[in-house]
Structures are given as structure tokens and as C-alpha cells.
Amino acid sequence: MRLQLRSRCRLPSRGRGRKVGSALVAVAAAVVLTLENPARAQVVQVDTSHTFYHEAPTRSNMTVYTPGVDLAVTPAEWVTIRGGYEADVVSGASVATKAGPAYQAVNPGVDVITTASVKDFRQSPRGGFTLRKGDVAYTASYTYGTENDYRSHSIFVGARTDAYEHNTQFDISYARNFDSVCDRVQAVNDTPPRFRALESSAGCFTDDPLRRRRPLSIDGFQASWTQAWTPTFATQLVYTAQLIDGFQSSPYRSIIVAQGLKAQEHHPDVRVRQALALRFNWYLRPLKVALRVSGRVYRDTWDITSGTGELELERYFAEGLRLAARGRFYKQTGALFWSDDYTGGDAPLGPKGQYFTGDRELSPFWSVAAGLRLTYAIHPTAKPDGGTARLIGIFTDAKLGLSADAMQFSYDEYTLAGTPITNARAYILGLTAGGAF
Amino acid sequence: MRDQKGSRSLLTIAALIALGGLGCVTVKPQQRSVLADPIMQFEGDPQASAQLRHAIDNREGSYGGGGVAGGGCGCN
């Protein structure tokens, strides 16, 4: 719950030497200008979130640190202005050349799997606003993303309304991405089975004659219905559709497609994805536990279908302190053009038409995950004289969260030249903090 | 063709009746203390949820159906 300020607001202290994107600076400047004009109702909300992801399956490893900060200012009840920044600091090694067991059997003694070190830094400043009138809220935002080999411009518009005495909420939104992927310039007469993979991101988004930009557009639509049925039971139904058009392969990955011939991964240009999720949120009074159950089904035009089941239990253990335990099961089929070896072998190996991939996320697999989340929220008690109570003299409201999740992946068909991956585990740590003043 | 139109109309009427029926579901404002609690929000911490989803989405072939903030406003 956000508290309203009636006295002068303070700006959040700046991080030591942290550079943020120009868009964020612009939003911060707008916030300063807003705060200079005292309003009757002002709320400033700052949230920061940090996620660490690590996995080290056979022959590869990946560590990603994702810091993020968001600032929201509500100078009047009818408007909220937001600015934020997020980054991905990526390091590790990924599979650069993928082959399957049939090829390895014909070429014993040759290590056909190669890996390449990966280092990347994605930065993503964002800004937006929400306008409210009665029970309806309209939101618009813009996000810019930049990394060594990828550029992204994303716009988002959404509307939300409450109905039936606030027991029902409908939410619709649309997002559009205008993205560019760096790729290698290929020989004029070459066709995909002879395309060569991008060696590195050096020269990307410059005038380098050996680099080119491949467009990628994404249209996304989402609609949701949230319903409170009883004082302790609510549901949410969410439908998502997405149309992706453009270059969707990894430009760095090569696939052995025939004896002695390797080519850059080649995916179809168009993909339409749809997902439907249903969530239940039920407070069990005798146990003082919130039980959350959710299920999701997914299908796309690459013929991947998947199902996801999630279960979460959360309980207060002290004033403001709550602990959640969660579990997740996920299973998907492979893409129509997925094959662990395009050079031949018995089914399900062998060529699958004009497309080929080495992406394990397009292979059939299942995963299980389990995790814990600890949240501590502080709401300072109001002063006896009616003044606003503040934590360490600043915050009217504060929150701290810690989470840890572990995931285990089990690949039905994906191998590295016949060697199955049995140790694909990922560990995800999260830290969040937020405050209002 | 006529059958298709008929079943579509039937579906539309059923949806409208269901939508109108939602008005019968009334949780009064004074009964919403539990629904308004952070423990009952579908997307209690949107930033943390988005980051976790970002990490998971990059390891799976699926996408979408993510949570939407809400669940109870505790308002009048």
C-alpha cells in the first residue's frame, strides 16, 4: 500500500558512480521538475531487483547477473510517471557447433562439438506513464534495449478497468518491438545450408562491410480477467498471443548438416505463439496460508506445445514477514524441424525439411523447479500526534525480498554428438528491495 | 454454415449471460481485507517476477500467460 505525502518530498540518493541511460536521466529530470511543485498528494516509489542465474551443463556454462531499478512518481491521483533501468551481464561458454550421434558414429575420434566464450552486456532503460479516470487506467511505455549484437525498441500500451464493485478486473495490452539482430554478410550465391555463422560481435552495428542488420518485429497482445469470488478466493485468466517476424536463429551457432558441411542455424522467419493460463489464489483461514495454483497451456506454429503447472504456498510468520515455497513442472514437445542429427540415422534423427537448429530449447524436454522466497515488509506505525511515521527518517513504507530457485532440465533427444546432457541444472537467486517516501 | 453462425451466436449469448452473472458475485469492501493483503496478490512483486520469468523464458521454447498485477484492491 502506498502512503501519501503531504510534506516536502526528498529525492532518492543516487547510487555511487552508477551511470544510467540517457532515457532514465530524462525521466529523473522530469521527476525533479514534478517534485519542485508541491502537490497535495505525492508518492515516490523506488524498487530495485537483482537476479543471479547460473548453469553449467556438459561443455557449456552461463552466468547472468540482472540488476534493475524502477522509480514511480504519483504527483496526483490521476497520473503516475515511471522510469527504470535493467541490465544483463552475461558471461560463459556456449555450444558453437552442434552435431548428433549419427555424424559422430561415422567420424569417431573427432570432437565435432565446439564451444565459444560468451561475454555480453545488455542495457535497457525504460519510461512510461499511467493515467487514471474513474475505474479505468491507461498505461503507455517505451523500452530501449542495446547489447553487442542486438538492438531493440519496444512500445507498450494497455488499459485496465474495474467492474462490479471492484470484484472484477479486465486488462488488455499490446506491445510492439522493432528489433535488429547482427549477422554476418553471406556470399551472394550462397543458400542457408552454406551460410557461415557469425564469428564474434566485433563490428556489429557499425559500417563494417562484413556485418549486416537483420530485422525482427514482434507484435504481442494480452488480455486478462481477474475475479474475486469470495473474501478468500480469486482467480485470474490470461491469454497471450505473439507474432514474431524476422531473423530468429542464433547467428553464432553452426549445425553439421551433412558430411563435412556445417552451416549457420536456420529457423523459419514467422512464428505465432499463443498461451492460456489460469490461476487460483485461495487463502486457507484455518492454516493461515495462501495457496496459489496455476496451469498454462501453450502452442505455436513451429509445432511446440507445452504445459506448465505451478504450486505456491505462502504464510506470515511474524508481522510483515512471510515465507513462500513454490514448485513448478514444465513439459514441451520439440519443434517440427528439430532433429538431434540432420546428417541421418534412425528416426527421430535425420533431416527435417529446409530448416535446422541446434537450440536445445526447441527440443522435447521437461523440467522441474523448486524454490523459496522470503519477504519482509515494514509499515511504520502512525505517530500519536497524527504525523507521518518514517523508517530511518525517510521511508513511509519499505520491503525486502530474498529468493532462491533451482531447476533441473531433462532433455529427451538433445545430445552433444551422442553424449546426453544429464546435469542441466540452473540456480536462480533473487534480491529485491523497495520503499516509498 | 448456418450451424456455424448458430453456434457462434449461442457462444456470444452464453458469454454475455456469464458476464452479466458476474454482477451477482459480490464481495463487499469490508470483506476484502484478505484479498487486499500482499499475500493474495497475483503479481505481488512485478519486477522480481518479470526477472524470474525473463530467466526462465530464455531456457524454454514457450512464452506468455504471465501474471497480471491484481487480485484485490481493498478499495471502496
Image (cartoon, coloured by chain):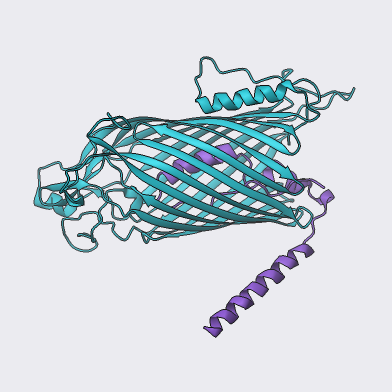
Chain colours: A cyan, B purple
Seen at 67% across and 28% down, the residue is: A435
Residue A280 x %, y %: 63, 55
Residue placed farthest to the right in the image?
A385
A328 vs A365, left or right, is right
Is residue A52 visible from the viewing direction of this image? yes
Residue A242 x %, y %: 47, 54
Seen at 77% across and 23% down, the residue is: A38
Q: Nearer the viewer, residue B75 or A288?
A: B75
Q: Nearer the viewer, residue A285 or A175?
A: A175
Residue B66 x %, y %: 54, 49
Disc tally is 0
Residue A260 x %, y %: 10, 48
B39 vs A382, left or right, is left
Is residue A406 visible from the viewing direction of this image? no
Whether A154 is drawn above or below A68: the answer is below
Residue placed farthest to the bottom in the image?
B2
A245 vs A289, left or right, is left
Seen at 62% across and 44% down, the residue is: B43
Q: Nearer the viewer, residue A92 or A156?
A: A156
The image quarter in which residue B20 lies: bottom right
